[in-house]
Amino acid sequence: MALTLVSLTLEHLLASSRDPVTFCGSSVAEGALPPDFIINEAVSALERGDPQLWCSPFAFLDTDLHEVVGSGGFRGVPKAGRVEIGYGVAEKYRGQGYASAAARSLVALALAEPTVLEVYAETSVTNPASRRAVEKAGFIHAGQRQTTSDGLVDQWIATS
């Protein structure tokens, strides 16, 4: 596996809904691109002038396969030294290490920024695969909380 994170520009985001079959000359696995609500939020943020690093998702490109296998990114700008990540992998590529590799890459990107002291993630308690992904990426379990959308979630922290 040779995973590369490709930052989705405004042009990519606007084109993704029109041509989800290819991306930068690579094929796109079904379900690999972010859902429409994330694309719409990113477009709005970029049009406002928010920093691309924190507001626009990344495509997870396997350069050996020449295929986008998933996507993810940061959930807004860092606050009080913390930034949250989110990610998803196309169903046909789950269980192959892509999520943990992407999470490690996102943590490295975030912690390279001087304003970021820790990276935060949440996983549903009913999703053991996502739990394994963050554990493999070096996150430490920090507790649980109840959410209205996902029910009970585990909270995770990664630091340098």
Image: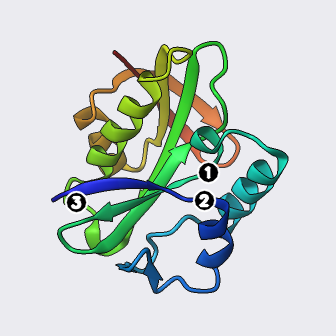
Q: Residue at x 41, y 38 (%)?
A: 106
The residue carrying pointer 3 sits among few (fewer than 14), some (14 to 19) or many (20 or more) residues within 10 Å by Cα, namely: some
Q: Amino acid at mark 2?
A: Thr
Q: Which mark is residue 56?
A: 1
The residue carrying pointer 2 sits among few (fewer than 14), some (14 to 19) or many (20 or more) residues within 10 Å by Cα, namely: some
Q: Secondary structure at mark 1?
A: loop
Task: Name the residue nearer the viewer: 134 or 38.
Answer: 38
State left or right for residue 153 relative to residue 43: left
In percent of width and height, residue 85 lies at 51, 39
State left or right for residue 46 relative to residue 118: right
Q: Is residue 129 above or below residue 82?
A: below
Foreground mark, 1 or 3? 1
As drawn, the residue found furthest toward the right would be: 48
Q: Residue at x 42, y 22 (%)?
A: 111
Q: CA distance from mark 1 to mark 2?
A: 7 Å
In percent of width and height, residue 103 lies at 36, 41
If the image is split into quadrants, where does the C terminus sit?
Answer: top left
The residue at which mark 2 appears reads as 9
Q: Residue at x 60, y 47 (%)?
A: 150
Q: Is residue 74 above or below residue 33?
A: above
**Mark 2 or mark 3: whose residue is earlier in sequence:** 2
Q: Amino acid at mark 1?
A: Ser
**Mark 1 or mark 3: whose residue is earlier in sequence:** 1
- Quarter of the image holding residue 62? bottom left
